[in-house]
Amino acid sequence: MNTTTANDTSELLRFATAGSVDDGKSTLIGRLLFDSKQIFEDQLEALERSSDLTGDGRINLANLTDGLRAEREQGITIDVAYRYFATPHRKFIVADAPGHVQYTRNMVTGASTANLMIVLVDARQGIIQQTRRHAYIAALLRIPHLVLCVNKMDLVGYSEKVFSRISTEFTAFATRLDIRDIAFIPVSALNGDNIVEPSTHMPWHKGPPLLRHLEEVYIASDRNLTDARFPVQYIIRPYSDEHHDFRGYAGQLAGGVFRVGDPVVALPSGRASRITGIHTFDGPREVAYAPMSVTLLLADDVDISRGDLLVRPDNLPTLGQDLEADLCWMSERPLQLNGKYALKHATRNTRAIVRLLRHRMNIDTLEPEAAPTLALNDIGRVRLTTLAPLAYDSYRRNRQTGGFILVDEATNETVAAGLIVDPPQVAPQAASDGGYAI
């Protein structure tokens, strides 16, 4: 393996792959790792020893991510496979997500934290229903960058005409989605064309190969550094007489910037205090920003618990028990209206009742349609009521404080991923006594 690695200050890009069955997602990731020399020698030896060689004797690079025996036997990706690699320019975590419609729920899981999604299209088939489904999910999950890789260009004679037709068709569809950055790259994952190095077979393509695009795509503005949000995950209490006065609140910033001296409000209680210290693994700091993991020290011994949200009093989220949300249904058991579910939002756990199903989304037409319930892989808008108040933002504004999951308490199965939509236009304000008023 190449010993050149990115330094500690390199940006981390999380990206996911999507596409229909046999579009070549796993092969593309395998080729990306292989050609960029990110494969350990023992991995390469294992691939060479395996019986999964293609007819012409080439290594099956898909096996680098299709680790389950069932995946290799069926030739499809079932679960999400995560791989880490780095170049001198950037660090990467890639989620190779399933393409079969049966495993759309796994694809949602893999893409939920991504900065970028690669959607593969078979050059022979063009845009199909799964292409539209995955692009819509990318837009729904607020993934800011999308790359449409038209794969298997070698099977259409590296035709510029085919690539242009597919790009034009997808562009027309994407105008109905809210994706701000779309790139188009013609590739052959099997042969390595336009994966790491520019393809000599497609000199008409003037853009960068895939790896260079991943290294150069601008992601610094993707994070919400405006709305300061700190979900409290753990309370660090005094552990010796020497540290009897130490009480810290540990967690990961979900948005914005906190500085020593900043006033803060704990929600949902509304209790106010001020930051007196910021501790990290590397020592104290004056400033912390998302997505850093830190421990905050406050001036007052206020009652704060796991699940509370620390915010600045001049920038408050919505506090309430009634939510409008889009649900990606992940269970084979359909949605039960007025059924009770456990709801996990950031670090807070509560219970919720789905009061109303407003509509189900038709993926082909991108139009809402009436439906009695949501079945596996359906996406629909609902209204929920929670047992305890939640401090939240819309998912459009903050993916961490705007997302949640629903869990069936009887089976402990995660049944849905929820994306909170914009709340009613009634701005909450801080009360004069430091509390919180709606």
Image (spheres, rainbow, N blue to C red):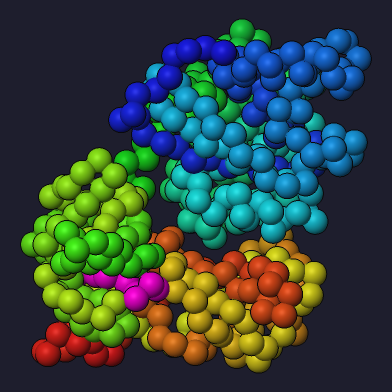
**Does residue 196 appear left or right of residue 79 in this picture?**
left
User: In the displayed structure, would residue 248 be above or below residue 96?
Assistant: below
Looking at the image, the residue that sits furthest to the top is 200
Where is residue 289? Give x, y as percent. 25, 51
The residue sitting at 32% across, 72% down in the picture is: 309
The question of residue 343 being in magenta is answered with no
Where is residue 359? Give x, y as percent. 64, 79
Main secondary structure of the magenta stretch: loop
Classify residue 261 by image quadrant.
Answer: bottom left
The residue sitting at 16% across, 47% down in the picture is: 285
The quarter of the picture where the C terminus appears is bottom left
The residue sitting at 79% across, 75% down in the picture is: 333
- Looking at this view, is 330 or 216 the one in front? 330
Is residue 131 visible in the rendered image? The answer is: yes
- Looking at this view, is 108 or 197 the one in front? 108
**Does residue 37 appear left or right of residue 87 in this picture?**
right
Classify residue 273 by image quadrant.
Answer: bottom left
The quarter of the picture where the N terminus appears is top right
Where is residue 17? Give x, y as percent. 63, 40
User: In the displayed structure, would residue 220 be above or below residue 89?
Assistant: below
User: In the displayed structure, would residue 398 be above or below residue 121?
Assistant: below
**Does residue 297 appear left or right of residue 100 in this picture?**
left
**Does residue 147 appear left or right of residue 131 in this picture?**
left
The residue sitting at 11% across, 70% down in the picture is: 299
Looking at the image, the residue that sits furthest to the left is 261
- Looking at this view, is 211 or 348 the one in front? 348
Where is residue 40? Give x, y as percent. 62, 17
Is residue 314 visible in the rendered image? The answer is: no
Which region shows up in magenta?
A: 305-312
Classify residue 29 by image quadrant.
Answer: top right
User: In the displayed structure, would residue 101 be above or below residue 390?
Assistant: above
